[in-house]
Image: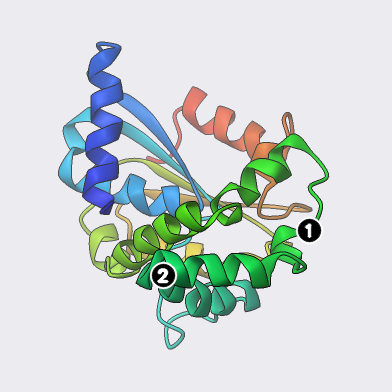
Amino acid sequence: MTPEAHVRDMCSVLDAFDVRKTDVVGFCSGAGIALVAATIEGHRIDRLALVCGEYMLSPTVCPQSNFQREVDSLLPLAAQSLNHAAALCEKLTASRVRASARTEFDEEVLVPFSSAARLHRHGLNYLTYRGTDFMALAGSVPHPTRLISTDRDEQVSAASSRVIAALLRNAEQHVVVPGDHYEILRGRNAVNDSIVEFLGGRGAA
């Protein structure tokens, strides 16, 4: 469940479809996985589009959102055992995390919190992800990269994208106004247009 394992899974999918090199779009923690992929499998990657990235930056480097602070308290507990995860699932039943889903995409977002087994696995993934130094990784990534953030993101601090962009060798930023963390899941909009424009054009130089 390490970031490196996720990269191996990605490469297995590429191999299955005989894809030697590809662009990578990373959303939320997927943005960090994309940076890991660019570091250890860089020859297989052309460009990176990092959307509303969660880079686990220290509060001394970048302010955390309320959501980030809550998750950082919740998921390490869920990782301890299935029993801990089950107890947390019960407590989350009436919370905003388990609020009635409004759309199919909202339901997908709630999947990690939908059972003790899933929440426990989510916690284990979170701990290994949290232990990765994405600032250090960013400095070694040469690929053309666009970092896309939104002005109403309540899940991750948009300032974290600015920090990572400053460390990347070949990066550009795009702030979507208006937009929230899950804009990428809502079909045709400015976030997805930005991804298509970047990957379809020359992008960062």
Residue underneath mark 1: 99
Residue 91 location (% of width, % of height): 66, 73
User: Amino acid type of disc 2?
Assistant: Met
Q: Is residue 48 left or right of residue 185?
A: left
- Mark yes or no: residue 160 visible: yes
Q: What is the three-letter code of the residue carrying label 1? A: Ala
Query: Which residue reaches farthest bottom?
Result: 60
Which residue is at a point 43% across and 47% down the rendered structure image? 30
Name the residue carrying label 2: 56
Q: Earlier in the sequence, mark 2 or mark 1?
A: 2
54 up-or-down from 91: above or below: above
Query: Against 35, is 10 above or below?
Result: above
Image coordinates of residue 197 in percent, x first then y, are 57, 29
Query: What residue is drawn where x is 29% and y is 54%?
Result: 169
Q: Residues within 10 Å of mark 2 (few under 14, many from 20)?
A: many
- Residue drawn 20% across the image and 48% down it: 39
